[in-house]
Image (cartoon, rainbow, N blue to C red):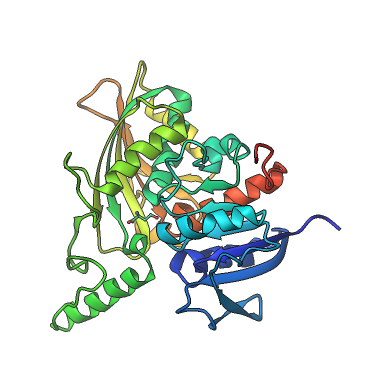
Amino acid sequence: MSRRYSVAVAGATGAVGAEFLQLLTERSGFPLGELRLLASARSAGKTIEFKGESLPVRELTPDSFAGVDIAFFSAGGGRSREFAGDAVRAGAVVIDNSSAYRMDPAVPLVVPEVNGEDAVRHTGILANPNCSTILLLMALAPLHRLSPVRRVVVSTYQAASGAGASAMRELEEQSRAYLAGEPVVKEVFPHQVAFNLFSHNTAVDETGYNEEERKLVYETRKILHLPDLAVTATCIRVPILRAHSESVNIEFATERPTVEAARQALAAFPGVRVTDDRAANQFPMPSEASGKDDVFVGRIREDGSHPRALELFLSGDQIRKGAALNGFQIAEYLIAHDAVKGAMRP
Ligand code: HSE
């Protein structure tokens, strides 16, 4: 019988953990052995339905990982820092969806379609990039392969899901209250999210950039192995449930690809769907991207203000390709390349 892999999901009751379980259900070819659901003490004792079975949620502890091959962490950076080492010592490979290890030089930061080859060099932990970075890279990488990119200017329109399941509920509840003329209650976000938008809810440092914008800059450079790539970002939270959108201006170093060449390169890239119908004014929309695996890319056009720049717009499901699906694909990549154990592991 072919090899099966025992999988633990730390953060199984969160939005991303739930999507990871959904992917395990959908992708029936995944060679799943035991499935262990882990969460905080608060959620321990609950059960989650998986393929017709009621699986118990257990408390995440240092002893949770005996016999686990692949541990997917999406329980926040604090939990990753506290327990990822235990998982690695127990022999598991950790695929971490938090920001805890992303910029650690020893930890591969991977979008499988873009830099899958980095994954096989792991020493126990791999990091899933920030959602807005993953979506940006899906459009940037095929164009960078066509002609080297020198500078990227990105503005994001980020859904509530990026702040978790409770933020999605807050958007729904605020929308209901607003339309009923009732007071809007703010618990998760610092500002009203329904019928409003605001600068991303992460700390702004002395440079004036917030943490989400800094992630886009540094993670993009790491994934593309371009430490000097010029990237600037403005990240905005919008009243959308689960798909992020981004407006992207890309300056090429020497030669701007034609719009047609860019469109073809994007259409040929796995995981990208080009939606670019000028006559019908049909372009990427979060309502269409929600629940889909593909990142939708369109509005592909020459930047009329710069001879070497292109403009585009994209939408992608934040919980799927922006988080759970990308992590799942990292696991699939490791299995396909016989690298779950990690050849470089001490
Ligand atoms: N940092 C993102 C957001 C979530 O706040 O939308 C990325 O997983």
* Left or right position of 116 against 251: right
The quarter of the picture where residue 123 lies is top right
Residue drawn 70% across the image and 45% down it: 336
Q: Quadrant of the C terminus?
A: top right
Residue farthest along the top direction in this orientation = 254
Q: Can you give x and y, in whole percent of width and height, for residue 250 in the image? A: 32, 30
Ligand 1 shown in quarter: bottom left
* Quadrant including the N terminus: bottom right
Can you give x and y, in whole percent of width and height, for residue 130 in the image? 40, 49
Judged left or right of residue 105, residue 36 is: right
Pinpoint residue 196: horizontal percent, then vertical percent.
17, 63
Residue 287 versus residue 125 in the image, above or below:
below
At 52% from the left and 79% from the top, the residue drawn is 44
Give the residue drawn at x 52%, y 69%: 12
Residue 103 rendering spot, x and y as whole percentages? 42, 40
Does residue 292 appear in the picture of this structure?
Answer: no
| Label tally | 0
Which residue corresponds to the image point at 37% horizontal and 43% vertical from the top-left?
A: 298
- Nearest the viewer among 331 and 85 is 85
Taking 333 as reference, is 242 left or right?
left
Q: Is residue 254 above or below residue 92?
A: above
The answer to whether residue 95 shows anywhere in this view is: yes
